[in-house]
Image (spheres, rainbow, N blue to C red):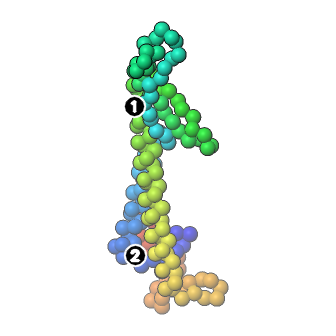
């Protein structure tokens, strides 16, 4: 649909900028690494053994234990991260997920701008009863010439 309506858009510098922004965002999305949602927390636990140091009043308990919590199907299961490397891996994956969320939000905004440009351009073009656009008199009606009006990224 974008290619069919592309010649309708007034390809000002703003239109090209919006299309380039979308291409850049899609490229960034394609190179994201592994990601997962969640958060990491630190907890101190008591084991329950009466002779353990954690059973003493005001004792520090065991820990800190690092845990990954995720919301899955309305529940919040936790996973203990046993090693520092597991903590680092989970932190990287969570940071990558947050980057993914940011990129998706930006992509939604850019696509919204493109849709508005297409809508404005479509309203500006006269339409026949059969729904086909009527090109200006000085433009050729062939699809080969319409391709000349496309920006370089859409060809």
List the residue tagged with mark 1: 88
Q: Nearer the viewer, residue 100 or 153?
A: 100
Count of numbered badges drawn on the protein: 2
Q: Nearer the viewer, residue 107 or 85?
A: 85
Q: Say if 39 sits above or below 147 in the image.
A: above
At x 38%, y 69%, the residue is 16
At x 45%, y 64%, the residue is 109
Which quadrant does the N terminus fall into? bottom right
Quarter of the figure with residue 128: bottom right
Label 2 packing within 10 angstroms: few (<14), some (14-19), many (20+): some
Q: At which x and y percent is residue 89?
A: 42, 32
Q: Secondary structure at mark 1?
A: helix
Q: At which x and y percent is residue 9?
A: 45, 77
Residue at the limit of the structure toward the left, as seen here: 13
Q: Nearer the viewer, residue 111 or 133?
A: 111
The dot on residue 11 is 2
| Whether residue 85 is visible | yes
Quarter of the figure with residue 15: bottom left
Left or right: 4 with respect to 41?
Answer: right
Q: Secondary structure at mark 2?
A: loop
């Amino acid at each position: 649909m974008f290619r069919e309506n592309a010649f309708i858009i007034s390809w000002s510098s703003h239109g090209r900028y919006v299309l380039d922004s979308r291409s850049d965002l899609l490229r960034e999305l394609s190179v994201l690494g592994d990601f997962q949602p969640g958060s990491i927390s630190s907890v101190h636990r008591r084991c329950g053994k009466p002779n353990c140091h954690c059973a003493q009043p005001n004792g520090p308990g065991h820990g800190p234990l690092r845990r990954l919590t995720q919301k899955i199907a309305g529940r919040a299961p936790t996973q203990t991260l046993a090693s520092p490397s597991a903590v680092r891996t989970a932190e990287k994956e969570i940071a990558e997920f947050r980057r993914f969320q940011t990129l998706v939000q930006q992509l939604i905004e850019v696509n919204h701008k493109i849709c508005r440009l297409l809508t404005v351009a479509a309203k500006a073009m006269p339409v026949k009863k059969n729904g086909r656009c009527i090109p200006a008199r000085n433009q050729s009606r062939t699809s080969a010439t319409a391709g000349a009006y496309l920006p370089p990224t859409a060809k």
